[in-house]
């Protein structure tokens, strides 16, 4: 894509039209043993595809710490992280309509 963006059709990426854009702020949701362990604002710096993995690199906007996460491209049973844009989060909140729902790791 001409603007440095990436088309990613993967269950760990919840972004508008499957497009992720470097230098944009997303929510990085980390999972541990099927539960959310941490949510942080995350500025995506780069996406790499290495062998059977997709890797994201960026900054935790709260600590300014550089972070990297990776997932299998195919045949993954769940996500150790999810990258979510704010439009996707807004849609989830609108669907909740005051009810509590869980964000599943798969």
Image (cartoon, helix red, strand yellow):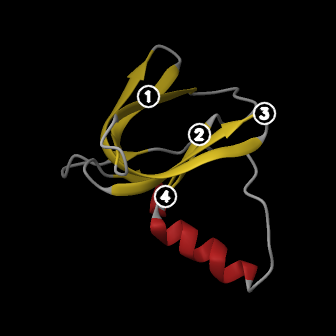
Q: Earlier in the sequence, mark 3 or mark 1?
A: 3
Counting other residues with Cα less than 10 Å from the Cα at mark 2, is it few (<14), some (14-19), or many (20 or more)? many
The quarter of the picture where residue 6 lies is top left
Residue picked out by circle 1: 55
Q: Earlier in the sequence, mark 4 or mark 1?
A: 4
- Disc 4 is placed on an element classified as loop
Residue picked out by circle 3: 33
Q: Nearer the viewer, mark 4 or mark 3?
A: 3
Residue picked out by circle 2: 81
Q: Report, in whole angstroms, how far the alpha carbon at label 4 lies from the one at label 1.
A: 16 Å
Counting other residues with Cα less than 10 Å from the Cα at mark 4, is it few (<14), some (14-19), or many (20 or more)? many
- Disc 1 is placed on an element classified as strand
Counting other residues with Cα less than 10 Å from the Cα at mark 1, is it few (<14), some (14-19), or many (20 or more)? some
Percent position of residue 100, x then y: 80, 72
Residues at circles 3 and 1 in contact by the CB criterion of under 8 Å: no
Residue picked out by circle 4: 15
């Amino acid at each position: 894509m001409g603007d440095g963006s990436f088309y990613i059709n993967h269950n760990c990426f919840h972004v508008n039209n499957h497009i992720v854009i470097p230098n944009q702020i997303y929510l990085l949701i980390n999972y541990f043993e099927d539960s959310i362990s941490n949510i942080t604002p995350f500025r995506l710096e780069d996406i790499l595809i290495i062998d059977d993995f997709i890797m994201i690199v960026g900054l935790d906007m709260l600590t300014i710490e550089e972070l990297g996460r990776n997932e299998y491209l195919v045949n993954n049973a769940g996500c150790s992280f999810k990258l979510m844009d704010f439009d996707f989060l807004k849609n989830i909140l609108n669907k909740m309509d005051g009810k509590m729902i869980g964000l599943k790791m798969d």
